Amino acid sequence: MTRELDKKLAARLKGLNLDGEIRVMEVCGTHTTEFFRTGVKDLFPHGLSLIDGPGCPVCVTPNEYLDRAIEIGRSHGPVIATFGDMLKVPSSYSSLAKEKAEGMDVRVVYSPVNALDMAAEDPGREVVFLSVGFETTAPAEAATVLEARKRGIKNFSIMPGNKLTPPAVDAILRAGEVKIDGFILPGHVSAVIGAAAWRFISESHGRPCVVAGFDAPDLMMGVLSLTDLIRRGKSETVNRYTRVVREAGNRTAVDLMNRVFLTTDSHWRGIGVIPASGLEVRNEFAEFDAVSKFPVTPPPPKEAKGCRCGELLRGLITPPECALYGRACTPEEPVGPCMVSMEGPCAAYYKYGRG
Amino acid sequence: MSKKIVAGHGSGGKLMNDMIEKVIRARFGRDILQLDDAAVLPTGGADIAFTTDTFTITPIFFPGGDIGTLAVNGTVNDLAVMGSRPLYISCALILEEGLELGDLERILDSMKSEADRAGVKIVTGDTKVVPAGKADRIFINTSGIGVFDAKVSRGDIVPGDKIIVNGTIGDHGMAIMALRNNLSFSRGLQSDCAHLNHMIGAVTGRFPESVKFMRDPTRGGVASVLNEIVQGKPFSARLFEDALPVRDEVKGVCSILGIDALYAANEGKALFIVRAEDAEPIVRILKETPEGKEAAIIGDINKEFPGRAYVETTIGGRRILPLLTEEQLPRIC
Amino acid sequence: MCLAVPMTITRIEGGRAVAEARGVETTVDISLMPDIKINDRVIVHAGFIIEKLDEQAAREIDEVWDKYLEEMDRP
């Protein structure tokens, strides 16, 4: 993309005059951060506000998940392999970072394959990989399970925590708690599930939505296209990330995901149980399911007092409206997950906004 | 304050700064324990600069250097950015049982050759061995003494002053992170580990009055140093994204792992705040030295967001550079 | 939600390939996109190729988006 296009888009966005207030939800946590990091959010015209949706795997993972992972770590002593995102997330009583300081063998990996190779290199040591993430990451985690079976690696298992995004967007729209004029849709989830998977937003909920990439021009064009559709009252699903996202997505990836995982109802932190929105390991692959392989009874889950991450993830409040924000809940001592993950709305707001 | 030491306490971010203030300086006395790269001490004669640092890097050998070159150069740079002339260094070794003697010899050789080239002498030291598992092969603590040939007078930083760096940022931090996440390089990425005393001497020799501030942005990177400069001040530090010298390989590793190069460690860089009118000539002097070939003016001081550092991005938007809490980790989201 | 980066395939070895971006090389898994070839431009997430980059669409962005910006001006 050329520099003149950047400048043209920036000038167009900055000069946009909206007759009323437009509220747009961006579903993806990476979008939340990139809107800040590229400076695009700083060009927003008056009246355009961005609401953070349930789009960061850390923020929507329920306490029970980490409570169980920590309990497995404590009572069975495996290596806990995880993406960096999960390290500082507070569980009901602790966090992986605190458990690591107490001696638990917690290792950060860039790819699930790194965790599998760890298990292969040390057959005597169990490795449990925390399988979180949305449709972009789940196929990779499923493929890793298939490879574990193929290579006969017995000391590797995963804790299924993946979530599916369309059901969450549908739940938010059905709840109708918050005014959302349109959606900026996650580019890389869409690379897997395809632009078609989002048509229900425009067809059955009558809201326009745009699949967008993550570079500055992608973000600007995403917002410009969406505000244009909103102002013309056109309820359409538009794909602005055509260099990566196809209408039907990546069938191989989706089939592979569905071969290892089973869709189930799933508890989303702050939103509650959403039907057919989570993934569990199929019985056929039970030997790779850490939940059945390492039975534990974690302590009852509890939410931190005063934590309003749930309402935030449903777009009902913005970070400064939470009483803990910036006081009891800071990036150094996060109370809720939204302040932990680089993608979390509060972390991004606290760091990149005006604090 | 969390009740146990966690990795973040060593990362150069807010967790570490809070601990230093509330746990250490509160006890040793804020007037006595100086927080700069080196303490400036009167001796009756010329003032001296005195510093200490510990090196615990893993892996101990990496492209562009090893724990030994890091220890010598890091100490020399801490003395040099205070404006002193580094003279003497100590070397305290903590060796893990089972460390290969050949590895120790190789590390000590690099310390000697770096010291010779920097013009400093390793004059004292200590050696301790700890049981296997109690250290990660080798830790090195160094202290250093430098002398102030002339009184260093640092003018106050004012809006309009320019921010200069002597070359590409993030090289060291991202070279190490790439190694740890098995990323390799077609053209290679090396740590920028280097001693900067001669380069800094060239600048302060010709422009003693115009350098307002110098620091080597190691852990926490350029962004953390800028935050330390502006915290509680009525001015802000602005960087221009398009002016930042960043190697392609560093951008590549950053985008793959989800890291920001402005927070990655540097081991052969100095950040200068200088009077506006002397910025261009200072960059020309830097470019004449081997360590300053890619020197650049990367920003300035203004009043846009008092007390904060920020970046003017390629598309003309602005984003605040927050004070990092702790080390950045590879992430998927 | 999903950090992913464009890379170019430089070597293919069994179930894995080597991909390069800006001089950085990494081994990537190809099970989600098995029919890739050398010099293909791909999108990599968490060590896996999740999609191929459509070079044609990438080249046309400036033109397509310029046209769209003009259309947006018409009431």
Image (spheres, helix red, strand yellow):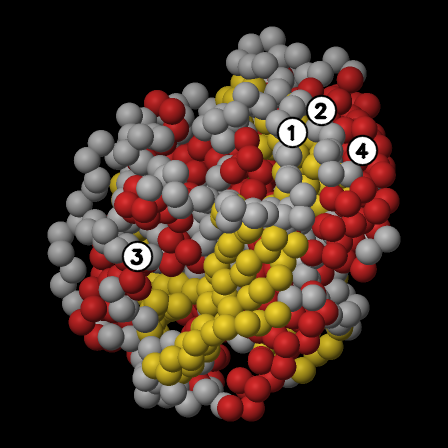
Please identify, in this view, whether the residue under mark 2 or under mark 4 is nearer the observer. 4
Q: Which residue is mark 1?
A: B155
Q: Nearer the viewer, residue A248 or A183?
A: A183
| Mark 3 residue element | loop
Q: Which residue is mark 4?
A: B278
Is the residue marked by circle 1 packed among few (<14), some (14-19), or many (20+) residues within 10 Å? few
Is the residue marked by circle 4 packed among few (<14), some (14-19), or many (20+) residues within 10 Å? some
Q: Position of residue C26 (x, y in %)?
A: 64, 70
Quadrant occupied by the C terminus of chain A: top left
Disc 1 marks a residue whose amino acid type is Gly
Q: Is residue A129 visible?
A: yes
Query: Is there one chain holding both mark 1 and mark 3?
Result: yes
Q: Nearer the viewer, residue A214 or B40?
A: B40
Q: Which residue is mark 3?
A: B5
Disc 4 marks a residue whose amino acid type is Asp
Parent chain of label 2? B
Disc 3 marks a residue whose amino acid type is Ile
Q: Residue at x 54, y 43 (%)?
A: B224
